[in-house]
Image (tube, rainbow, N blue to C red):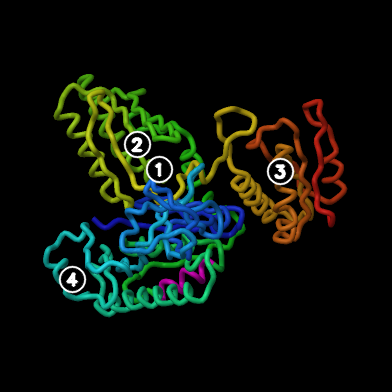
C-alpha cells in the first residue's frame, strides 16, 4: 500500500530550525537544529593525528573545531596513521556528552541512488531490494566502478538509467573536489559538510511517495525547488510556501506531539503506557498495563499491551533518535509463543528504520535486548539541557525557549499594529535573550520588545504581558509582581 509522506520544514528562525516527516497523518521523524553544529555525522575533515594510544588501539585526531576525533586503528587498515601526520576522515558518530566524534578514513558519500565509497572496490545492493532480477540488473548497470565502490540504494530500484548514471557521476566529481581541496589547504580543517538537514531529509525521502513539502521560509522553498530540479524527473509532489506569520508546526497540529517527545511517559491506545528512561549507559523502557483491560483473560490483556508497546517502542526510539543499547521490560508473559510474537512485532516495526536496529532476544529475566545505530544526537540532548536549579532534572534549551517566544511574538504582531511588546520570563533566560537575540528580533519585526525578568520564575513560564505604545509598555514593565524580589527590565539601547 502506498504511504502518503509529507515534509514540514519550519526554517524561518535561526534560533531553532525543525523538519518533521509525517506519514499517513502520523509524525514519523523529527530533525532539530540550533545553529549548524560542528562535527556532524557525514562531515569530512583533513585531520592531524595528535596522538596514538597503543593500549586502546586508537588514535586521537585534531579536526580543527570542537573536541578531538576518535579513530579505531582497526578501521584504518591500509591507511598511514602516525603522529603529526595528515589524514582525510569522516565523522561516523557525532560528539555526545563527554565523548568526541568517532571518525573513519573509509569515506562514504551519499547520493539519491548510490552511496559512493572512494576507498572500496566492491558493489553492494540494499537488502530492501528483494527482487533477484532487479539486483542483478542494477549490478550489471553499474558494472565496475573506475575508482572505488558503491552501495546501490533502495531508491535506485525504480530509477531511470540516465538518472542513475548522473547521480554516480556527481558523487565521483564531488570526491574529486574534496581531494583537490585537501591538497590545497593546511590541516586541520573541514573539507566538506553534509547538506542542510532539510535537503538530507528530502534526499532520503524521495524513495517514498512524498505528496508535499511545506515550508515557512522563502530560502528553504527555493532550496527545495533547486534540489528537486537537479535530482531529475520522477517526483510529482508539490512544494508549498506558507507565509502567514504563524507557527508552521502549530498550524499543522504538530506542536503538542513534539513537546511530548521530551516526556518519559507515552500512552498506548489500549490504556497501557511506556516509561522511557535515558541514561549515560543505555535507555531503559518499562511497559505497563495501566488502564488496559482488553482481552478475555489476563494473558490476552498482557499480550495485547505488549504487542502495542513493541510497535510504539520502534516508533519512539526512531522519533527520539535514541541510539546505543535499549533494554525493554515487557510485562511478564508465561507463553513462549507470546514472547516470540512480541519480539517479532518489534523486529517488524523496526524494519523500516533507516538506522540499523537489532533485536537480540530476551534475557533470563525477561528483558528484551535491542541496539540501534547512533548517527546523531538524541532528541532529548538536542532540545534540553541540565537544569541549574535541580540535581538530575532537565529543562528546555535556551535556543528552544527563545524560538518559542519569537514564534509567539510573530503571531501577536501579525494581529496587532502596536509598536511595542512586553514579554515576562525567568530572569536568567531574559538576560540570555537580551544578550543574544533581542536586537535581531526587533530588526526582524520592526517593533520594540521589552523583557521583564522575573527572579525565581520557572524557565518555561513566560508570557507576552502586553502590546501597546512605549508609555504603556515601559510603565507596566516597572509594575510589581507577586514575589518580594523586584523584576528587572531588559531592552536594547535603541528602545
**Residue drawn 46% across and 40% down?**
261
Task: Give the Cα separation between the discs numbered 2 and 4.
Answer: 36 Å
Q: Position of residue 382 (x, y in %)?
A: 52, 46
**Residue bearing the label numbered 1:** 322
Q: Is residue 229 left or right of residue 65?
A: left
Label 1: how many Cα within 10 Å (few below 14, some 14–19, many 20+): many
Say whether residue 211 is visible. Answer: no
Indicate whether 362 appears above or below 174. Answer: above
Indicate whether 400 appears above or below 103. Answer: above
Identify the mark nearer the N-term, 2 or 4: 4
The quadrant of the picture occupied by the C terminus is bottom right
Q: Position of residue 358 (x, y in %)?
A: 26, 43
Q: Quadrant of residue 125?
A: bottom left
The quadrant of the picture occupied by the N terminus is bottom left
Indicate whether 217 appears above or below 273. Answer: below
Q: Secondary structure at mark 3?
A: strand
Task: Give the Cα separation between the discs numbered 1 and 2.
Answer: 8 Å
Task: Give the Cα separation between the discs numbered 4 and 3.
Answer: 60 Å
Residue 96's label in the rendered image is none
**Residue placed furthest toward the top:** 298
Q: Position of residue 272 (x, y in %)?
A: 35, 27
**Residue bearing the label numbered 2:** 326
Q: Nearer the viewer, mark 3 or mark 1?
A: 1
**Residue bearing the label numbered 4:** 139
Residue 208 lies within the magenta run:
no
**Residue bearing the label numbered 3:** 464
Identify the mark nearer the N-term, 4 or 1: 4
The residue range painted magenta reads 220-230
Q: Is residue 145 left or right of residue 176?
A: left
Q: Position of residue 296 (x, y in %)?
A: 20, 22
**Residue drawn 29% across and 71% down?**
148
Say whether residue 34 is visible. Answer: yes
Amino acid at each position: 500500500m502506498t504511504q502518503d509522506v509529507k515534509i514540514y520544514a519550519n526554517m524561518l528562525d535561526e534560533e531553532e530550525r525543525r523538519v518533521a516527516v509525517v506519514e499517513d497523518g502520523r509524525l514519523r521523524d523529527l530533525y532539530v537544529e540550533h545553529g549548524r553544529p560542528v562535527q556532524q555525522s557525514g562531515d569530512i575533515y583533513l585531520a592531524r593525528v595528535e596522538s596514538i594510544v597503543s593500549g586502546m588501539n586508537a588514535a586521537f585526531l585534531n579536526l580543527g573545531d570542537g573536541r578531538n576525533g576518535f579513530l579505531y586503528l582497526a578501521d584504518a587498515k591500509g591507511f598511514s596513521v602516525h603522529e603529526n601526520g595528515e589524514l582525510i576522515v569522516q565523522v561516523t558518530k557525532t560528539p555526545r556528552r563527554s565523548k568526541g566524534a568517532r571518525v573513519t578514513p573509509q569515506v562514504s558519500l551519499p547520493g539519491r541512488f548510490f552511496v559512493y565509497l572512494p576507498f572500496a572496490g566492491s558493489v553492494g545492493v540494499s537488502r530492501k531490494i528483494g527482487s533477484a532480477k532487479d539486483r542483478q540488473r542494477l549490478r550489471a548497470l553499474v558494472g565496475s566502478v573506475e575508482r572505488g565502490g558503491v552501495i546501490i540504494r533502495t531508491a535506485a530500484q525504480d530509477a531511470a538509467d540516465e538518472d542513475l548514471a548522473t547521480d554516480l557521476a556527481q558523487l565521483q566529481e564531488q570526491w574529486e573536489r574534496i581531494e583537490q581541496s585537501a591538497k590545497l589547504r593546511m590541516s586541520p580543517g573541514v573539507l566538506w559538510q553534509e547538506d542542510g538537514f532539510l535537503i538530507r531529509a528530502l534526499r532520503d525521502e524521495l524513495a517514498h511517495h512524498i505528496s508535499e513539502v511545506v515550508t515557512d521560509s522563502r530560502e528553504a522553498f527555493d532550496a527545495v525547488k533547486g534540489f528537486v530540479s537537479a535530482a531529475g524527473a520522477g517526483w510529482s509532489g508539490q512544494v508549498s510556501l506558507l507565509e502567514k506569520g504563524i507557527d508552521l508546526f502549530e498550524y499543522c497540529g504538530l506542536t503538542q506531539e513534539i513537546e511530548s517527545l521530551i516526556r518519559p511517559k507515552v500512552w498506548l491506545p489500549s490504556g497501557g503506557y511506556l516509561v522511557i528512561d535515558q541514561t549515560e549507559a543505555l535507555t531503559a523502557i518499562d511497559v505497563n498495563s495501566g488502564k488496559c483491560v482488553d482481552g478475555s483473560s489476563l494473558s490476552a490483556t498482557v499480550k495485547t499491551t505488549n504487542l502495542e508497546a513493541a510497535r510504539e517502542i520502534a516508533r519512539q526510539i526512531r522519533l527520539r533518535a535514541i541510539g546505543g543499547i535499549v533494554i525493554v521490560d515487557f510485562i511478564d508473559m508465561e507463553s513462549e509463543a507470546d514472547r516470540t510474537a512480541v519480539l517479532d512485532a518489534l523486529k517488524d516495526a523496526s524494519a523500516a528504520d533507516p538506522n540499523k536496529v537489532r533485536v537480540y532476544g530476551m534475557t533470563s529475566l525477561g528483558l528484551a535486548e535491542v541496539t540501534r545505530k547512533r548517527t546523531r544526537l538524541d532528541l532529548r540532548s538536542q532540545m534540553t539541557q541540565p537544569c541549574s536549579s535541580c540535581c538530575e532534572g532537565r529543562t528546555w534549551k535556551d535556543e528552544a525557549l527563545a524560538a518559542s517566544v519569537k514564534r509567539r511574538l510573530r503571531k501577536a504582531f501579525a494581529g496587532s499594529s502596536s509598536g511595542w511588546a512586553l514579554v515576562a520570563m525567568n530572569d536568567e533566560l531574559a538576560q540570555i535573550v537580551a544578550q543574544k537575540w533581542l536586537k535581531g528580533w526587533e530588526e526582524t519585526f520592526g517593533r520594540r520588545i521589552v523583557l521583564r525578568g522575573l527572579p525565581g520564575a520557572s524557565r518555561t513560564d513566560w508570557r507576552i504581558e502586553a502590546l501597546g505604545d512605549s508609555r504603556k509598555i515601559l510603565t507596566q514593565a516597572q509594575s510589581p509582581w507577586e514575589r518580594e524580589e523586584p523584576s528587572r527590565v531588559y531592552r536594547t539601547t535603541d528602545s
